[in-house]
Image (cartoon, rainbow, N blue to C red):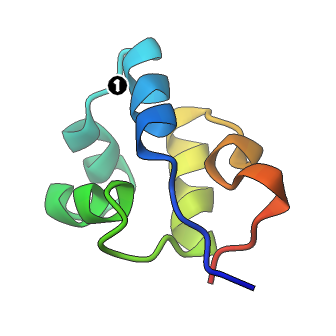
């Protein structure tokens, strides 16, 4: 099964809709802004833990972050 990839624009749109800045989200989940950017742009893998942390920090449902039942590594 292929690893999960983040639908960057969907997640970025959710950040914007909720009034969240990428840098603020990165700080909340204790990763660097550049690492979160890499994940959002597909240059780094989205782990299930990171997806869960993003969900908890932003209120974005995990199903939105990992659509179609995809499992992160």
Q: Residue at x 68, y 41 (%)?
A: 64
- Left or right? Give the position of 14 relative to 16: right
- What residue is disc 1 on? 20
The answer to whether residue 36 is above or below residue 15 is below
> Which residue is farthest front?
2
- Left or right? Give the position of 71 relative to 46: right
Quadrant that contains the N terminus? bottom right
Badge 1: how crowded within 10 Å, few (<14), some, or many (20+)?
some
Residue 43 rendering spot, x and y as whole percentages: 29, 72
Residue 15 rendering spot, x and y as whole percentages: 41, 28
Q: Residue at x 59, y 72 (%)?
A: 49
Quadrant that contains the C terminus? bottom right
Residue 62 rendering spot, x and y as whole percentages: 71, 48
Q: Residue at x 51, y 55 (%)?
A: 6
What is the total number of numbered labels drawn onto the structure image?
1
The answer to whether residue 59 is above or below residue 3 is above
Q: Residue at x 15, y 61 (%)?
A: 34
Q: Give the secondary structure at mark 1.
A: loop
The answer to whether residue 39 is above or below residue 37 is below
- Left or right? Give the position of 31 relative to 63: left
Residue 33 rendering spot, x and y as whole percentages: 18, 55
């Amino acid at each position: 099964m292929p690893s999960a990839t983040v639908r960057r624009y969907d997640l970025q749109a959710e950040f914007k809709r909720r009034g969240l800045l990428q840098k603020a989200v990165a700080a909340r989940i204790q990763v660097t802004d550049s690492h979160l950017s890499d994940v959002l742009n597909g240059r780094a893998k989205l782990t299930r833990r990171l997806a869960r942390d993003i969900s908890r920090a932003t209120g974005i449902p995990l199903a939105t972050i990992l659509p179609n039942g995809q499992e992160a590594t």
